[in-house]
Amino acid sequence: MPGFELPPISPLAGANVFNFLKIIRKGKIQNRYFIKVLLTFLVTILALPFHIWEKIWYHRKIKRFEFTSPPIFIIGHWRSGTTLLHNLMTCDPKSSYFTTYNGVFPNNLASKLIFKTFMRVSMPGKRPSDNVKLGPDLPQEDEFAVGNWGMESFYLFFFFPYLYEEVYTNAVHIKQDSKKQKWLNDYDELLKKACINTGKGRLIVKNPVNTARLKLLTEYYHDSAFIFIHRNPYHVYLSTKKFFGKLFPSIMLHGISPEEVEDLIFDLYKKLLSDYYNQKETVSSDRLLEIRFEDLETGPEKVLKDIYLKFEIGSYQQAEMEFKNYLKVNSDYKKNNYTISIREFNRINAEWAHFISKTGYSFPDDIKIID
């Protein structure tokens, strides 16, 4: 998942060996990454007996499992506050979620002692891009788990950036009905497994890619709620630039230039947001809430109260102390300071003007424009 690194092992270490081979055959691996691929391949071979045991252990559990409450999906572009909202909502003891461990090793939950120890000693304590705390048992998004589970995942583009548009079509715009149904059935199993892993409470799912899968998900999870969080596009651009700049070198298997990363950021933002706005009408107003990151940042308790009230999640008061504790512990968190070039500033104004206007944002005072 974003911000997580297992040098010199790829996050694909969490896939079974057959799925690993299927994934790496989809792209061209540059010579300098062969050692990483080989070491990752060895991990998947060593894990094969555990994967077999996993299927036996969880097969019946998943088949018998029923959600006690419909999942809640947190969506929105990367760097828009999805992590903060997810971390807050999962403070509620009655919630379930993907853990960081589950996000990489969805096939190894029954043998977590060995692989979680490996993760704990290998991963950094904070995300390199923004200093958010990391840990094997902390809440995390699920798109890497989607790929390692054996499904079409958009995060294949992190390994092979040049396949970005092809992967977006295959993993987000799933066109064939049979493939859609297969993907949804597999995703449902993955979500149920995460729910079993963290206590069977209401599942809170955070995945930016799901922003463009809104119609697909709402047709399958009829009673689920969706929370779309958005942020000032100028901040989103600069934060995404730093985020991708840290993440790509750590996990890609084929190089990408800084210019290509910039083009990708601009295009992906337009794709993701356009898909969201084109699909949002498929969700009834009582199951969709749009919030601003800036409101969450300055008044988190009010935003949480609004969420609990709108979706009738339960008693906000029963979880209030957990929310307060989280906010207190993280009160010293320091955000990144940013500058932006005139060229980038002008490009944002030209290419994202529609979205800037739609969300009512203007250029923020805390970003300095430089030549």
Image (tube, helix red, strand yellow):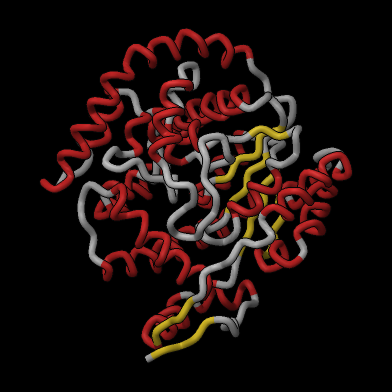
Q: Is residue 132 above or below residue 27?
A: below
- Relative placement, left or right, of 357 versus 148 is right
Front-most of residues 96 and 310 = 96
Q: Is residue 149 above or below residue 242?
A: above
Instruction: Look at the image and tell me whether residue 304 can be seen.
Output: yes
Residue ranking furthest to the left: 31
Query: Residue 135 at what x, y percent from top left?
Result: 52, 40
Residue at image location 37% in from the left, 30% down from the top: 14
**Quadrant the N terminus occupies:** top left
Q: Quadrant of residue 72?
A: top right
Residue ranking furthest to the bottom: 371
Query: Residue 370 at what x, y percent from top left?
Result: 41, 89
Front-most of residues 250 and 271 = 250
- Relative placement, left or right, of 179 versus 220 is left
The image shows a total of numbered marks equal to: 0
- Relative placement, left or right, of 370 versus 221 is left
Query: Residue 28 at what x, y percent from top left?
Result: 16, 45
**Quadrant the C terminus occupies:** bottom left
Q: Quadrant of residue 312?
A: top right
Instruction: Look at the image and tell me whether residue 172 can be seen.
Output: no
Query: Residue 234 at what x, y percent from top left?
Result: 51, 75
Front-most of residues 171 and 309 = 309
Q: Is residue 349 above or below residue 315?
A: below
- Relative placement, left or right, of 277 versus 225 is left
Residue at image location 40% in from the left, 88% down from the top: 342
Front-most of residues 48 and 71 = 48
Residue at image location 28% in from the left, 19% down from the top: 46
Residue at image location 34% in from the left, 69% down from the top: 262
